[in-house]
Amino acid sequence: LVVLDFADERSVVQTRFATTALTLLRAHLGLHTEAVVADARTALATPLPESLVDRTQFTFLGRGWTVGLANEAGLKMREASLSWTEAYPAMEYRHGPISVTTEGTATWMLGEAPPGLAEQVRGTGGSWIAGTLDPLAELVRVQRLAVAVAARRGLDPDRPRHLTRSVILAS
């Protein structure tokens, strides 16, 4: 039993519990290093590119375990800022969904990108954001972007429309 009382969610779209649980798992597996901690600090301290808040579409890509993080990034961005978002395994994106990428698209890679993918995205006119930090730290950067986009659009990222803090299923 692992009690994470300190990770109580205050925002509808916050993922403190999920990121804490994933960090705990990674630490248990010996994958939570000092470099990961440094990347997390960098994710909080480094300014986001200004041009990203004006994008109209956001695509998040992953490989292996980071595909789940890409899906989480897309979901949080969509919920907090009412943005058009998509998430794919990087190679699947290359196979077809890249066809809708335009100048208004930001494509964000969580983890290492397949060779040549960045050039293909840039060739569409879209923006390429290489995830240079630990993928979980990149997720923090995405969440910061979601808040910035929401603010630009006059939205409250903690209270998105039609969502509640918990879902109650009734039979």
Image (cartoon, helix red, strand yellow):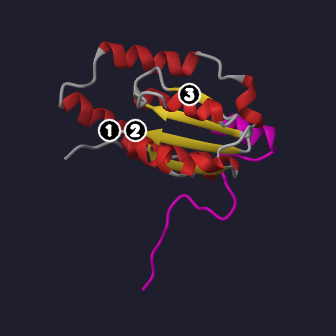
Residue that label 3 marks: 119
Labelled pair 2, 3 in contact (Cβ < 8 Å): no
Identify the amino acid type marked 1.
Answer: Leu
For mark 1, what is the residue? 22
> Mark 3 touching mark 1, by CB under 8 A?
no
Horizontal side of residue 2 vs 6, given as left or right: left
Query: Mark 2 = which residue?
Result: 19
Q: Is residue 21 above or below residue 48?
A: below
Callout in the foreground (3, 1):
3
**What type is the residue that disc 3 sits on?**
Glu
* Dot 2 and dot 1 residues touching (CB under 8 Å): yes
Q: Is residue 21 visible?
A: yes
Which range of residues does the magenta coloring cover? 146-171
* Whether residue 139 is visible: no
Residue 128 located within the stretch drawn in magenta: no
Q: At 42% across and 27% down in the image, what residue appears?
A: 115
Q: Residues within 10 Å of mark 2 (few under 14, many from 20)?
A: some
- The disc labelled 2 sits on which kind of residue? Thr
Q: Main secondary structure of the magenta part?
A: loop
- The residue lying toward the viewer, choosing from 45 and 70, is 70
Q: Is residue 40 above or below residue 152?
A: above
The residue drawn where x is 64% and y is 39% is 146
At horizontal 65% and vertical 44% (from top left) the residue drawn is 101
Q: Quadrant of residue 25?
A: top left
Spot occupied by residue 133 in the image (x, y as percentages of width and height): 45, 21
Task: Return the x and y of residue 17 as percentages of the image width and height.
Answer: 40, 43
The residue lying at 80 percent from left, 44 percent from top is 153
Distance from Cα at disc 2 to Cα at disc 3: 31 Å
Judging from the image, what secondary structure is the residue with disc 3 in? helix
Image position of 127 with respect to 12: above or below: above
Within the magenta stretch, is there residue 163?
A: yes
